[in-house]
Image (cartoon, rainbow, N blue to C red):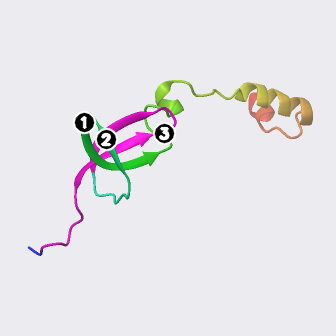
């Protein structure tokens, strides 16, 4: 097997800057920064979104009112612009 063909697979510290959440995982990503976590120094990767801050995982996502949009469309264009009125009627 050839030597020096694979990147260095090591533990890396990921820091979600939006909610100050840090976690360690293994990665081959190259970084210039280092960070300390639980007394040990790791290569540091700063990220904007993680499972700790993403709206889907936190349950704080917005629900779009599609029924209100359909009613607004029907009021504006009537039955002429809507094919759903043919299917319903």
N-term-proximal mark, 1 vs 3: 3
Residue under label 2: 36
For the record, the magenta segment spans 3-26
Q: Examine the structure image and report whether residue 24 is included in the region drawn in magenta.
A: yes
Q: Which of the image's four quarters has the N terminus?
A: bottom left
**Residue placed furthest toward the left:** 1
Res. 81 visible in picture? yes
Q: Examine the structure image and report whether residue 77 is included in the region drawn in magenta.
A: no
Res. 89 visible in picture? no
User: Residue sitting at 78 percent across and 30 percent down?
Assistant: 69
Residue under label 1: 39
User: Residue sitting at 77 percent across and 25 percent down?
Assistant: 68
N-term-proximal mark, 3 vs 2: 3
User: Residue sitting at 48 percent across and 39 percent down?
Assistant: 17
Name the foreground residue: 23 vs 86: 23
Q: Position of residue 6 (x, y in %)?
A: 21, 67
Q: Position of residue 45 (x, y in %)?
A: 39, 49
Q: Is residue 28 above or below residue 72?
A: below
Residue under label 3: 17
């Amino acid at each position: 097997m050839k030597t020096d063909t694979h990147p260095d697979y090591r533990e890396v510290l990921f820091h979600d800057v939006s909610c100050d959440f840090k976690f360690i995982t293994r990665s081959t990503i190259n970084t210039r920064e280092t960070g300390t976590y639980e007394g040990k120094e790791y290569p540091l990767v700063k990220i904007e979104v993680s499972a700790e801050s993403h709206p889907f995982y936190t349950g704080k996502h917005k629900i779009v009112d599609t029924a209100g949009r359909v009613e607004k469309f029907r009021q504006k264009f009537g039955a002429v612009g809507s094919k759903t009125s043919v299917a319903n009627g």
